[in-house]
Image (tube, rainbow, N blue to C red):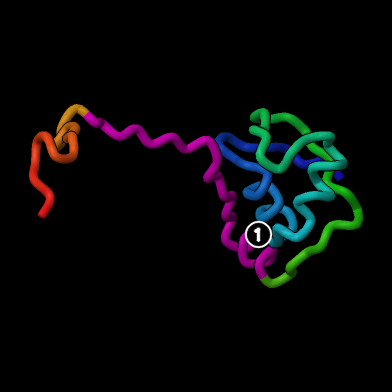
């Protein structure tokens, strides 16, 4: 079976959407000659092996509610232009 990746989907997101389980992550990666941490290409087709493990309850919940998880590629930037800066032990403060 061929499945397509959506915007910001990781391998685990794609598996959760189409199988309801992460249990076949390695089989999926091997079938597509990739790592489970590789970024997916939006709209690209990937092979979902026939022998994947499916969690029917979770798959039905996602399907019935039209959930399409997309948690990959999230980048959080932390501004570090403020704060205490740096200190040198025994030079800028005293340890007792």
Compare residues 34 and 82 and report the one nearer the observer. Answer: 82
Compare residues 52 and 66 and report the one nearer the observer. Answer: 52
* Residue 91 colored in magenta in the image: no
Q: Determine which quarter of the picture holds residue 8.
A: top right
Across and down, in percent, residue 80 comes to: 24, 31
Q: Please tell me how many numbered marks the rendered image carries.
A: 1
19 lies left or right of 50 = left
Query: Badge 1, how many Cα within 10 Å: few under 14, some, many 20+?
Result: some
Q: Is residue 46 above or below residue 25?
A: above
Q: As drawn, which residue projects farthest toward the right?
A: 50
Across and down, in percent, residue 58 comes to: 66, 67
Where the C terminus falls, by quadrant? bottom left
Chief secondary structure of the magenta span? Answer: loop
The residue under the point 69% across, 72% down is 57
Where the N terminus falls, by quadrant? top right
The residue under the point 71% across, 51% down is 15
Compare residues 45 and 34 and report the one nearer the observer. Answer: 34
The residue under the point 75% across, 51% down is 25
**What SS does tag 1 mark?**
helix
Q: Is residue 6 above or below residue 63?
A: above
8 lies left or right of 38 = left
96 lies left or right of 57 = left
Q: Which residues are magenta?
A: 58-80
Across and down, in percent, residue 87 comes to: 17, 35
Q: Which residue is mark 1?
A: 63
């Amino acid at each position: 079976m061929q499945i397509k990746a959506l915007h910001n989907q990781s391998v685990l997101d794609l598996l959760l959407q189409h199988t309801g389980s992460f249990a076949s992550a390695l089989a999926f990666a091997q079938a597509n000659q990739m790592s489970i941490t590789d970024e997916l290409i939006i709209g690209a087709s990937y092979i979902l092996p026939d022998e994947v493990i499916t969690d029917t309850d979770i798959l039905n919940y996602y399907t019935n509610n039209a959930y399409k998880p997309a948690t990959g590629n999230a980048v959080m930037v932390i501004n570090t232009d403020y704060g205490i800066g740096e200190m040198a032990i025994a030079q800028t403060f005293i340890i007792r």
